[in-house]
Image (cartoon, rainbow, N blue to C red):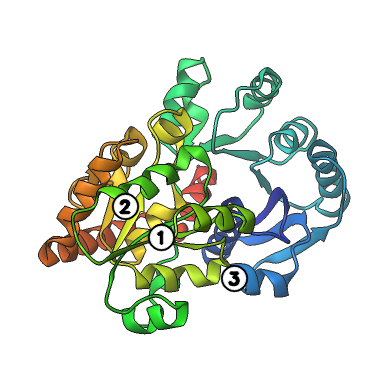
C-alpha cells in the first residue's frame, strides 16, 4: 500500500475529537511511508496548524459545501472518482462513502467504526457494505464482540485502539509556568477533566465529586464544552473553574498544569461502558500524570491498576475517595504516572498506522 486516500465527512473549521483523530492518523500514515491525501471539507493547512497543531505532511484536498451530511457523502464519492483514479486504498469513517466506494470502485476500502448507532437504516447499510470491505477497523474489543454477536464475519474485523503522538506532550513548560500561562493558582492541587460535556462522558460525576473531597485546598478544573454551556456552569458552580473548548495545541499545557486527571465515563450507555477508546486517556498517559478512571470494560481493555486508579462509575463519592487517595501519596502519583507513560508507548499513532499497512502484506 503506497497511495491512501482518507475520506472524512467533516467541516474542519471547528474543533472536534474525530478531526484530531483523523489528522493524527493521516500524519502517522505519512510517517510510515504512505502517500496520503485527506479529502474533506474546509481543511486549510494554515487553520489546521493553528487549531490542531498539525503541519500537514500529507496532501489536502479541500471541498466546500453547505449540503446535508448525506449529500456531502455523495459529493465526496464523486470527487474520488473525478480526482483520485490512481488511489490504491480508500480509508473512511463515513459509512455511505464506504458503501459507494466498496461497490463501485476497484480499489480496496477500509471502514473505521467508532460506535453502533441505533438507526435501522444505518444497520441495513452497514450489512450491505460489510462483505465488500477489505477490512473494518473498530476502536475497541467491545465493538468487535457486538458485531460478531450480530453475525458479522470476524476475519474482516481489526481491533485498533486510538492513540497518541508522545512528542506532542513532551513540552518544556514546568507546572508553575503552565499554571501562570493559564491563569491557574500556583499552590492549590488541581484535579482536571478535559473533554466533551456529553452526558455519557460523566462530567456531572466529576463536578459532584468536588463536593465530597476530603483533601483541602483543591481546585477542580474542567476544560471543554461550548461557551454557552461553560457560562451556565460557571454560574451554577462558582467554586470550580471552567474553560470552554480549547485549540488542541493548548491541551498539553492544560495537562501539565494538573495534579490528577479524571475520566468519569458513565456505565449507563454502551458507547461509554463497552465501545469507547478515549483519546483523552492516551493523552493523559502521555502527559505523565496520575489518572482516575471509571471502572468499565472499555477502560480495563486498555489500562489496569498499575497505570490508573479505578473508581465506581456514576458514583461521585467513589471518585472523591480515589482522588483523595492519589493526592495523599506522592509515591503513588509518581508510580502511576511512570507506568501509564510506559504503556502509552504501545499506543502510538505510528504503530496503529503500521498495523493497518500490514493488512495489505500477504
Residue found at x 73% / y 52%? 87
Q: Which residue is mark 2?
A: 210
Residues packed near mark 1 inside 10 Å, few (<14), some (14 to 19) or many (20 plus): some
Nearer the camera: disc 3 or disc 2? 2
Q: Nearer the viewer, mark 3 or mark 1?
A: 1
Tell me the SS state at disc 3.
loop
Image quadrant of residue 45?
Answer: bottom right
Q: Is residue 2 in view?
A: no
How much space separates mark 3 and mark 2, taking CA atoms?
35 Å
Measured Cα–Cα span from mark 3 to mark 1: 31 Å
Which label is found at residue 54?
3
Q: Where does residue 190 sit, x and y in percent of width and height?
A: 31, 66
Query: Mark 3 or mark 2, which has the lower sequence index?
Result: 3
Q: Earlier in the sequence, mark 2 or mark 1?
A: 2
Find out whether the residues at labels 2 and 1 contact each other: C-beta distance under 8 Å: yes
Residue 31 on image: x %, y % = 53, 66
Q: Is residue 360 left or right of residue 35?
A: left
The circle on residue 344 is none
Percent of width and height locating residue 113 = 56, 37
**Under tag 1, what secondary structure?**
loop
> In this image, 72 relative to 160: left or right?
right
Q: Mark 2 falls on what kind of element?
A: helix
Whether label 3 touches label 2, CB < 8 Å: no
Q: Earlier in the sequence, mark 3 or mark 1?
A: 3
Q: Is residue 281 above or below residue 338?
A: above
The residue depicted at 52 percent of the width and 30 percent of the height is 156
Q: Residue 12 in the image: state x and y as whole percent.
A: 71, 59
Q: Is residue 238 above or below residue 121?
A: below
Mark 1 lies on residue: 240
Amino acid at each position: 500500500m503506497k497511495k491512501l486516500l482518507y475520506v472524512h465527512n467533516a467541516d474542519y473549521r471547528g474543533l472536534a475529537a474525530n478531526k484530531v483523530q483523523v489528522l493524527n492518523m493521516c500524519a502517522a500514515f505519512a510517517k510510515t511511508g504512505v502517500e496520503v491525501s485527506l479529502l474533506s471539507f474546509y481543511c486549510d493547512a494554515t487553520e489546521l496548524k493553528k487549531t490542531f497543531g498539525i503541519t500537514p505532511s500529507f496532501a489536502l484536498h479541500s471541498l466546500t459545501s453547505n449540503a446535508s451530511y448525506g449529500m456531502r457523502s455523495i459529493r465526496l464519492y464523486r470527487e474520488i472518482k473525478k480526482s483520485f483514479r490512481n488511489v490504491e486504498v480508500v480509508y473512511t469513517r463515513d459509512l455511505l462513502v464506504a458503501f459507494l466506494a466498496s461497490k463501485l470502485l476497484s480499489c480496496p476500502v477500509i471502514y473505521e467504526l467508532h460506535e453502533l448507532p441505533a438507526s435501522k437504516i444505518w444497520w441495513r447499510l452497514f450489512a450491505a457494505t460489510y462483505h465488500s470491505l477489505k477490512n473494518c477497523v473498530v476502536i475497541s474489543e467491545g465493538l468487535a464482540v457486538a458485531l460478531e454477536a450480530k453475525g458479522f464475519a470476524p476475519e474482516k474485523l481489526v481491533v485498533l485502539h486510538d492513540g497518541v503522538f508522545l512528542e506532542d506532550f513532551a513540552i518544556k513548560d514546568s507546572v508553575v509556568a503552565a499554571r501562570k500561562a493559564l491563569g491557574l493558582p500556583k499552590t492549590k492541587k488541581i484535579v482536571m477533566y478535559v473533554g466533551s460535556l456529553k452526558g455519557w462522558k460523566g462530567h456531572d460525576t466529576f463536578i459532584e465529586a468536588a463536593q465530597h473531597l476530603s483533601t483541602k485546598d483543591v481546585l477542580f478544573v474542567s476544560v471543554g464544552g461550548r461557551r454557552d454551556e461553560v457560562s451556565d456552569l460557571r454560574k451554577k458552580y462558582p467554586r470550580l473553574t471552567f474553560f470552554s473548548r480549547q485549540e488542541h495545541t493548548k491541551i498539553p499545557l492544560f495537562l501539565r498544569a494538573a495534579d490528577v486527571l479524571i475520566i468519569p465515563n458513565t456505565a449507563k450507555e454502551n458507547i461509554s461502558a463497552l465501545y469507547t477508546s478515549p483519546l483523552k486517556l492516551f493523552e493523559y498517559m502521555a502527559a505523565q500524570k496520575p489518572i482516575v478512571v471509571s471502572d468499565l470494560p472499555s477502560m480495563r481493555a486498555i489500562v489496569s491498576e498499575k497505570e490508573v486508579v479505578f473508581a465506581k462509575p456514576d458514583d461521585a463519592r467513589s471518585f472523591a475517595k480515589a482522588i483523595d487517595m492519589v493526592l495523599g501519596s506522592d509515591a503513588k502519583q509518581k508510580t502511576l504516572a511512570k507506568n501509564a507513560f510506559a504503556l502509552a508507548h504501545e499506543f502510538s499513532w505510528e504503530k496503529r498506522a503500521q498495523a493497518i499497512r500490514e493488512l495489505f502484506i500477504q
